[in-house]
């Protein structure tokens, strides 16, 4: 008598295909036929799971790669691309002082990733050469000084940060250029009419 199932009431072994227990008479709702297990069935299940995972994971991975390619976060040469920066209107203050606010930056980037250059429409033209962006005094040329204020002190360029130019010569036009340090490309520019 081949059995693999016991009666739930009296624990007597139940032969295959019986509808009730021979010892206690307990009716079985479904005749007992154990499922046939095979090694090939287990292999098929594993293969199906792997295929389903691949069908799900491959598009996700390809989507991530395409996102980075089209988003411009990384350029073709492997260098990070410059963020898009917008300056607000120049604000004039007494004593020949001007402020240029940073209005928007499309993504966070460390201050060291930027360079600043200030030119004027007189003399040699270059007032303050290209210097790395940092919080505080960037450079001074006699009475002319350029400072940067990192509003949130996070070490990144963000909206709300600002440049301040002091000691300007009345009647002179200055140009503040923000450059991306990795490429030297111009990111943003603002003309200041003193």
Image (cartoon, rainbow, N blue to C red):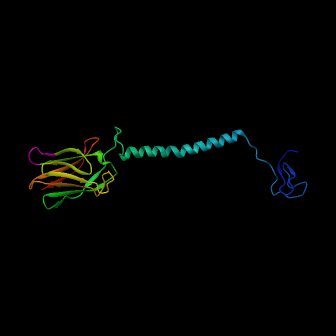
Number of disc labels: 0
Nearer the observer, 47 or 155 = 155
Left/right of residue 70 with respect to residue 6 in the rendered view: left
Left/right of residue 17 with respect to residue 73 in the rendered view: right
Q: Residue at x 71, y 39 (%)?
A: 39
Left/right of residue 142 with respect to residue 106 in the rendered view: left
User: Is 122 one of the magenta-colored residues?
Assistant: yes
Left/right of residue 142 with respect to residue 72 in the rendered view: left
The percent coordinates of residue 154 (x first, y second) are 33, 53
Q: Residue at x 65, y 43 (%)?
A: 45
The percent coordinates of residue 4 (x first, y second) are 82, 47
Range drawn in magenta? 121-127
Looking at this rendering, what residue extends furthest in the right direction? 23
Q: Residue at x 12, y 49 (%)?
A: 142
State the image quarter where residue 93 is shown.
Answer: bottom left
- Image quarter in which the N terminus is found: top right
Looking at this rendering, what residue extends furthest in the top direction? 77
Nearer the observer, 94 or 66 = 94
User: Is 108 one of the magenta-colored residues?
Assistant: no
């Amino acid at each position: 008598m081949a059995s693999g199932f016991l009666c739930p009431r009296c624990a007597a072994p139940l032969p295959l295909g019986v509808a009730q227990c021979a010892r206690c008479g307990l009716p079985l709702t479904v005749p007992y036929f154990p499922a046939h297990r095979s090694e090939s069935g287990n292999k098929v299940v594993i293969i199906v799971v792997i295929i389903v995972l691949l069908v799900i994971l491959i598009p996700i991975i390809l989507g991530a790669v395409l996102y980075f390619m089209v988003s411009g976060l990384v350029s073709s040469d492997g260098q990070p691309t410059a963020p898009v920066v917008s300056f607000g209107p120049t604000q004039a203050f007494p004593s020949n002082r001007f402020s240029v606010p940073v209005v928007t930056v499309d993504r966070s980037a460390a201050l060291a990733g930027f360079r600043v250059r200030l030119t004027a429409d007189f003399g040699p033209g270059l007032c303050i050469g290209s210097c790395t962006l940092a919080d505080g005094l960037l450079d001074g040329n006699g009475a002319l000084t350029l400072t940067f204020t990192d509003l949130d002190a996070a070490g990144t360029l963000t909206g709300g940060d600002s440049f301040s130019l002091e000691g300007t010569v009345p009647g002179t036009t200055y140009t503040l250029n923000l450059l991306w340090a990795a490429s030297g490309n111009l990111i943003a520019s603002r003309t200041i009419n003193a």
